[in-house]
Each structure stands twice: as structure tokens, then as C-alpha cells.
Image: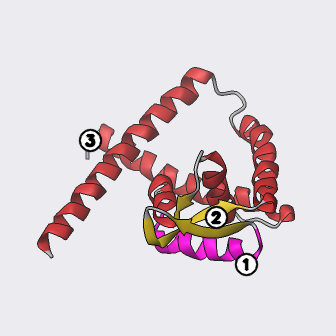
Amino acid sequence: MSRRDETVVALILSVFRLNGQLIDAGNRLVLDIGLTSAWWQVLGALDLSPVPLPVAHIARNMGLARQSVQRVADLLAEKGLVQFEPNPHHQRAKLIVLTPRGRAAAKSAEERQRPWARDITAGLSLERISTALEVLTHVNKHLAQAASATDEDFTEEK
């Protein structure tokens, strides 16, 4: 294995570990406001969107399984943080809308996230952070394109 290949594998393993640590740290960060990282992720996606979204769009935007987002959305609805509304573009795919409680929870999580993010990146220059973002964005786009091509191949075979 080349040095480049070894470094890429190390990067991938590091991202896996980082993902787990981010989920764990996120759970601790929002625990006392009644959220989990998964709930926060869906609330955040809705809060950032200028329009209500169906589950499939949230899943696609966040790189998550539709079924996982549906389970979270159902739990958030039970807790009164979101509600489902009719979708004029699709009869069965309801739109998820933040309730006032959901918007307040998302805002509270975001307010905590900013200083936390500054703390975990302390000592890193904007240039290094930007470079890391470029690398992760490139890998993410490549994986999304590969998954899309695989989905198209699978659909064509049926």
C-alpha cells in the first residue's frame, strides 16, 4: 500500500472515530434541553431550510437513511417539536414543520453549538479549517455521486 493510500485509510478511520465522538459530545451538549444528536440534526435541518421539507429530502441532505429520519420525525412529533402537514407536491410524503417548541429547541442547541465549535477548533487557523472542509466536501460529493450512480443502476435493473 502506498503512503497516499495509507493516509487516505487513516483519514477515513479518523472520520469514523470523529463521527462517533461528535454524536456522543452532541448528546451531552443537548441532553438537558431534551434532545439527542439525532433529534438535533433533524431539527437543525428544518431550522436551516427556508421551506418545510419531507423526510426524504432531509435524509438526502444529511446523508442519512430515510427510515432513520422518519423514526426521528415521528418521535419529534410525539414530543411536540414538529408537526406533519400536507405536501402539495406529494400526497403521501408529508412536510415536517417546526413547532414553536421545536424552533426554540433548535435555537437553544445552536446557541450552545457555536462556543462548543470554537472550543474544539481552538488553535486551528481558518486556512486549516477551510482546507479540511474542502477535503471532506470533495469526498462527500464523490460518495454521493457514486451512491446516485449505484441507485440508478439498481433502478434500471428492475
- Going by the numbered disc 3, the residue's amino acid type is Ser
Q: Earlier in the sequence, mark 3 or mark 2?
A: 3
Q: CA distance from mark 3 to mark 1?
A: 51 Å
Residue 132, relative to residue 51: is it above or below?
above
Q: Position of residue 80 (x, y in %)?
A: 77, 71
- Going by the numbered disc 1, the residue's amino acid type is Glu
Instruction: Please state if 81 lies on the left or on the right of 157 as rendered.
Output: right
Q: Position of residue 38 (x, y in %)?
A: 64, 64
Q: Residue 78 got which mark?
A: 1
Residue at which label 3 appears: 2
Q: Position of residue 135 (x, y in %)?
A: 43, 35
Q: CA distance from mark 1 to mark 2?
A: 15 Å
Disc 1 vs disc 2: Cβ atoms closer than 8 Å?
A: no
Q: Position of residue 153 (x, y in %)?
A: 17, 64
Q: Earlier in the sequence, mark 3 or mark 1?
A: 3
Region in magenta: 64-80
Residue at which label 2 appears: 38
Considering the whole magenta stretch, tell me its main secondary structure. Answer: helix
Give the residue drawn at x 82%, y 54%: 104
Label 2 sits on a secondary structure element that is helix
Circle 3 or circle 1, nearest the eye: 1
Residue 122 occupies quadrant: top right
Residue 128, relative to residue 57: is it above or below?
above
Label 3 sits on a secondary structure element that is loop
Residue 141 shows in this picture: yes
Residue extending furthest toward the right: 32
The one nearer the camera, 141 or 75, is: 75
Residue 23 shows in this picture: no
